[in-house]
Image (cartoon, helix red, strand yellow):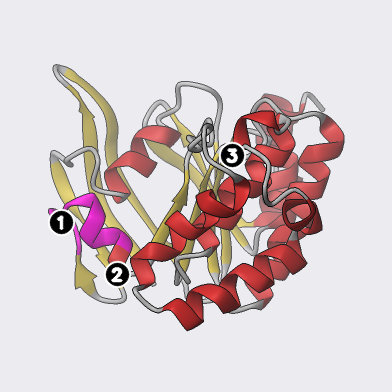
Amino acid sequence: MLEITNLSSGYGDVQVLSGISLTVGEGEVVSLVGANGAGKSTLVRTIMGTLPPREGSIRLDGQDITDLPAHRIARLGIAQVMEGRRLFNHMTVEDNLLIGGDILRDKQRSRENLEWIFYLFPKLEARRRQLARSFSGGEQQMLAIGRALMTSPKLLLLDEPSIGLAPIMVETVFEKLPEINARGITIFLVEQDVHRALNIASRGYVLEHGQIVMSGSGADLLEDDGLRKAYLGI
């Protein structure tokens, strides 16, 4: 579904990513892990068209999206849950979700998605009339994921969903990812919590200093001694 080939990107005179190549197959959960500053969020921004690549290509279902603007990429079926969530805090939970559904231009489908999201995250339905700013960090993350799902994405791109969350809320969010995937949504998870990210993934990639240094099944990567020492402290 997603194919990235020899991708390089950065900011101004600083090159952050160098020669990145990876794939995400339809129906997979694929994790990209790495420490802070490895270039994970830069890759997300480049995929989504908010940061132009310096070289290389990005293809979605065989279509070259390398130079497309972000709004066109979103309409092709990639939904991003941004680091920091970026909600409309002065608006209600329901209005935040409905804004996500606007991209569909299909009221019936939007209503169906809303019902599913309320089933997935019952707390959102119970507090649908409250302002987003009244939510805790974990609740806001649920809302951010729900808003992305309102677009009926082919590919859900999650950028550091565990950041700033209490452990119990991290657990809650990660427990929902297999259920989302079972609905036919491919997931590309970008995360610094290596154990959680690889434990849930069919395949994974390790990013260090802007380059892919390791790849394999989630289980195999978790058994790698070098990775365990570097990221898990064991």
- The quadrant holding residue 4 is bottom left
Q: Position of residue 169 (x, y in %)?
A: 80, 39
Residue 66 % position (x, y): 17, 55
Inter-mark Cα distance, 3 to 2: 24 Å
- The structure residue drawn at horizontal position 52% and vertical position 52%, both measured from the top left corner, is 95
Q: Residue at x 69, y 30 (%)?
A: 134
Residue highlighted by disc 1? 68
Nearer to us in this view, 66 or 165: 165
Q: Is residue 67 magenta?
A: yes
Q: Does 64 sit above or below residue 165?
A: below
Q: In this figure, which residue is indicated by the disc labeled 2?
A: 76
- Which mark, residue 13? none
Q: Mark 3 or mark 2, which has the lower sequence index?
A: 2
Please give the residue where the numbered disc 3 appears in the rendered image.
Answer: 191
Taking 126 as reference, is 115 above or below it? below
For the question of whether residue 83 can be seen, the reply is yes
What are the residue bounds of the magenta stretch? 65-74
The amino acid at mark 1 is Leu
